[in-house]
């Protein structure tokens, strides 16, 4: 048995058995742990002894989940959070000082964007943005106080691809920390650390859970950076609950088979949409027509489960399409067994001006499909009847 193989690591990375020799890891639903005596308690608090103290710090279930993600991402260490956003916030809050500067791709998840524009400026931390197709401008944005280079790939919701190898080389040349949100790809499809990322963040709420049940997040990467993130989090309290960690660790056992099937379905949906008369454009990383197809092939195993397309007729057509959907869900989540359809211009991004939407790749007719695991012909039939 080689634990280096993805599926085997995802299943066989396990906390120690109890005296019952259970096959599947039990749930340690406990807020704290007991000590045999005062000396053991003292040594545990000073970290002379490595053991569980309190579930805000560590817990066997969160440790198992983190260990798996570390193996699957090729990372030295990690810390698990209650949500993807607490992973994003705590990573920045732990590593940045007042007056530091971030260079980020402009297409990032909405709440991450709000963090950059509304909250980090409270501590005098500013962010400069580059467009996904203008990575050549990144070096021009770097200042003496720049500390972090940040990006998501594929991006949400426009499914653009950024060249991780290129970002890795820029970060190395300028001594910046490269932090990548790998949520859309999962560790199964893409490992940013191989391309030079120092830290990788996931919203485990998406494909890692994959069944739309729990929220979770994780940051993994270099041990010295994770140590800072751990100390910040141990004191500020964004920890993942043991129950959610147990669910997510179980979910990882089936990640490879689920994501394989998601990608197979998504490619078929993308090919169907590409040939539809009411669709003017389709973006899916593994379609040859994707502007960054070659980069996607270089850094991703398969294309993921998100397909973006442009419906002819703009906002009105997008709303009409959503209203005509019968089986797929209209929901804000993604990466679920259920196919989910969203129209950002009339929903999540409706408060932005058209110019601001276009800046992050959201055109009026853009529809995002998170392709699920239903029988693919049923997914296609629903989209087809809604497009007519
Ligand atoms: C790319 C990306 N990062 C982070 C998040 C935030 O994750 P969570 O909802 O678990 O806080 C999301 C949520 O959709 C996302 O799509």
Image: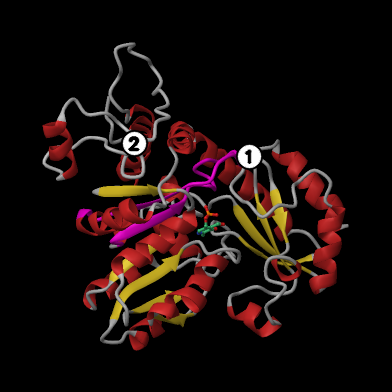
**Residue 191, how many percent across, how many down?**
36, 53
Structure colour scheme: secondary structure
Q: Going by the picture, which residue comes out furthest to the front?
A: 38
**Residue 96, how many percent across, how many down?**
31, 71
- Estimate how packed mark 1 is, as few (under 14), some (14 to 19) or many (20 or more) residues with alpha carbons within 10 Å: some
Say which of 203 and 160 sits in front: 203
Who's the residue at 72% across and 72% down the image?
350
Say which of 150 and 3 sits in front: 150
Say which of 233 and 107 sits in front: 233
Tell me the number on the disc at residue 337.
1
Tell me, yes or no, if residue 388 can be seen here: yes
Badge 1 vs badge 2, beta-carbon distance below 8 Å: no
Who's the residue at 30% across and 31% down the image?
33
**Residue 128, how many percent across, how many down?**
43, 83
Tell me the number on the disc at residue 376.
none
Who's the residue at 77% across and 40% down the image?
378
Say which of 355 and 145 sits in front: 145
Who's the residue at 65% across and 73% down the image?
362
Q: Quadrant of the C terminus?
A: bottom right
Specify whether 219 is left or right of 377. left
Asked if 223 appears above or below 22 in the picture, the reply is below
Q: Which residues are magenta?
A: 197-223
Which quadrant of the view contains residue 386? bottom right
Q: Which residue is mark 2?
A: 59
Asked if 41 appears above or below 107 in the picture, the reply is above
- Gap in angstroms between the C-alphas marked 1 and 2: 28 Å
């Amino acid at each position: 048995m080689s634990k280096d193989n993805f599926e085997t690591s995802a299943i066989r990375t396990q906390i120690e058995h109890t005296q019952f020799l259970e096959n599947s890891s039990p749930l340690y639903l406990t807020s704290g742990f007991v000590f045999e005596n005062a000396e053991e308690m003292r040594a545990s608090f000073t970290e002379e002894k490595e053991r569980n103290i309190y579930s805000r710090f560590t817990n066997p279930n969160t440790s198992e989940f983190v260990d798996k993600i570390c193996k699957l991402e090729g990372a030295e260490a990690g810390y698990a959070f209650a949500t993807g956003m607490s992973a994003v916030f705590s990573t920045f809050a732990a590593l940045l000082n007042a007056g530091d500067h971030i260079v980020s791709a402009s297409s990032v998840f909405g709440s991450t964007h709000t963090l950059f524009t509304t909250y980090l400026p409270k501590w005098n931390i500013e962010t400069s943005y580059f467009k996904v197709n203008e990575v050549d401008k990144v070096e021009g944005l770097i200042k003496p106080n720049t500390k972090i280079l940040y990006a998501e790939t594929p991006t949400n919701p426009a499914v653009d691809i950024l060249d991780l190898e290129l970002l890795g080389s820029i970060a190395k040349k300028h001594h910046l920390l490269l932090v990548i949100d790998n949520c859309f790809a999962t560790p199964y499809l893409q490992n940013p650390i191989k391309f030079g990322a120092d830290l990788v963040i996931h919203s485990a709420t998406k494909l890692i859970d994959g069944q739309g049940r729990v929220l979770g997040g994780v940051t993994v990467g270099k041990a010295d950076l994770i140590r800072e993130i751990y100390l910040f989090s141990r004191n500020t309290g964004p920890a993942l609950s043991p129950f959610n960690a147990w669910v997510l660790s179980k979910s990882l056992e089936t990640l490879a088979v689920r994501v394989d099937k998601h990608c197979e379905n998504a490619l078929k949906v993308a090919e169907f949409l590409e040939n539809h008369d009411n669709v003017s454009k389709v973006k899916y990383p593994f379609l040859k027509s994707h502007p960054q197809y070659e980069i996607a092939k270089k850094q991703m195993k398969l294309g993921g489960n998100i397909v973006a397309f442009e419906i002819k007729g703009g906002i009105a057509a997008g709303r009409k399409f959503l209203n005509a959907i019968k089986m797929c869900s209209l929901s804000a989540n993604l990466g679920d067994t259920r196919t989910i359809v969203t129209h950002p211009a009339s929903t999540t991004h409706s408060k932005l001006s058209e110019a601001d939407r276009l800046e992050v790749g959201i055109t009026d007719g853009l529809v995002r499909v998170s392709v699920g695991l239903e029988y693919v012909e049923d997914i296609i039939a629903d989209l087809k009847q809604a497009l007519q």
